[in-house]
Structure formats: structure tokens, C-alpha cells
């Protein structure tokens, strides 16, 4: 059964834990699509900790740019998919100077074509102060556009604060 869930929240809000628990409610093999890159020791430690938190039902696909392709590959291998996270994927795209509108459209097409339950995690970065530099403002704006596009397409959206879900859709 196809179902798309978007899980939004701030840093350390509990969104990844919530998303993982929702994905684990599905029977069978689970796919975890990781968009993070271990560019430093601290990020490598975070990635290792996330891997340890998942059990043997999980297969991991690491994809920093071609998220749509990873979803397509995972949907043939798994009974449910968790993408963590859209915000890091967006950051990777911006650093690669990719066409963000085209990448978002390609992602939307992959989500629509996905035949299994799909859980997508993203940071809500628009609740704070206006960033003081152009790159940070551009990132905030693009993250807001991406979250709106995916939320519009999702069957369900949850906002996580202090580990507690608030149903948005």
C-alpha cells in the first residue's frame, strides 16, 4: 500500500526517531536512504550512530545527489523506505550548483511513482531569525519551497517538537 509521510522538525527535535518508528511499523525489509556525507569526523560519528540505531531489517543506500534514483532503486528492494534527510540533500544540491527546480520535480515524480510506503524527513528552518548572509537566506528559502512541494504531495505530514508529533496533514 502506497503512503507518503513527511516528517518535519527542528534540530534534535526527535524527527528521525519518529520517522524510523513509523517506517518500522511496516512488515518486511526496510530501506534507509541516507543523504548525508561524512565530510568530517563529527558527521562520520553521527552517521555511525544512526546506523547502529537501525536493526537487521534495514538496508542502507547512501545517495547525496540522485535521491529520485535512490528511491526508484529502493522501491524494488524494500517494503518501505525512509529518506533522511531532504535538508541535507538540498544542501548537497546547492553546493553542486544543481538545478533545484528540476531536482525537486524529479523527486516529486519519483515519490509519485514509488509503490511502497515512503517516509521523508526534513528540517523546518524557517522559524528562526532571518539569516545574516545571502547563502544562508537562499538555503532557508529553498528549504521552505522544497518542504511546501513535498508536503503538498504527501498523504500525511507531521511536525515534531520535543519528540512529540503534531499532525499537520
Image (spheres, helix red, strand yellow):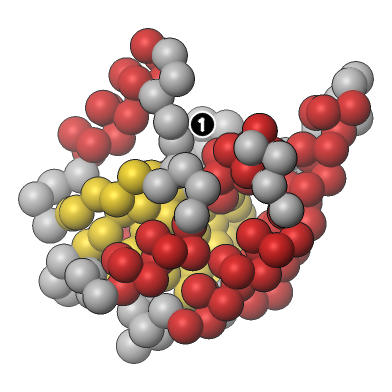
Residue that appears at 39% across and 60% down = 70
Image quadrant occupied by the N terminus = bottom left
Residue 19 seen in the current view? no
Name the one closer to the observer, 65 or 31.
65
50 lies left or right of 125: left
Relative to residue 157, is residue 14 depicted above or below? above
Quick one: which residue is furthest to the bottom in this view?
A: 1
Residue 103 seen in the current view? yes
Residue that appears at 16% across and 66% down = 29
Residue that appears at 79% across and 39% down = 140
Residue that appears at 43% across and 31% down = 37
Relative to residue 31, is residue 129 depicted above or below? above
Quick one: which residue is furthest to the top in this view?
A: 41
Relative to residue 38, is residue 93 depicted above or below? below
Residue 105, quarter of the rendered image: bottom right
Look at the numbered disc 1 and give the secondary structure of its residue: loop
Question: In x, y percent, where is residue 72?
Answer: 38, 71
Residue highlighted by disc 1: 12
Question: In x, y percent, where is residue 149?
Answer: 71, 67
Quick one: which residue is furthest to the left in this view?
A: 56
96 lies left or right of 71: right
Amino acid at each position: 500500500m502506497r503512503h507518503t509521510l513527511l516528517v518535519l522538525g527542528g534540530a534534535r527535535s526527535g524527527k528521525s526517531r519518529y520517522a524510523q518508528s513509523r517506517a518500522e511499523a511496516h512488515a518486511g525489509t526496510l530501506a534507509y536512504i541516507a543523504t548525508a556525507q561524512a565530510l568530517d569526523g563529527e558527521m562520520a560519528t553521527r552517521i555511525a550512530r544512526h546506523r547502529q540505531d537501525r536493526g537487521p531489517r534495514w538496508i542502507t543506500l547512501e545517495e547525496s545527489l540522485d535521491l529520485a534514483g535512490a528511491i526508484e532503486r529502493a522501491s524494488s528492494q524494500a517494503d518501505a523506505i525512509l529518506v533522511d534527510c531532504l535538508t541535507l540533500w538540498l544542501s548537497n544540491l546547492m553546493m553542486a550548483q544543481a538545478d533545484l527546480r528540476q531536482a525537486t520535480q524529479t523527486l516529486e515524480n519519483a515519490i509519485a511513482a514509488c509503490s511502497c510506503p515512503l517516509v521523508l524527513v526534513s528540517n523546518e528552518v524557517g522559524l528562526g531569525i532571518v539569516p545574516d548572509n545571502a547563502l544562508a537566506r537562499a538555503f532557508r528559502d529553498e528549504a521552505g519551497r522544497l518542504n511546501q512541494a513535498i508536503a503538498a504531495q504527501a498523504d500525511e505530514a507531521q511536525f515534531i517538537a520535543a519528540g512529540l508529533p503534531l499532525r499537520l496533514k
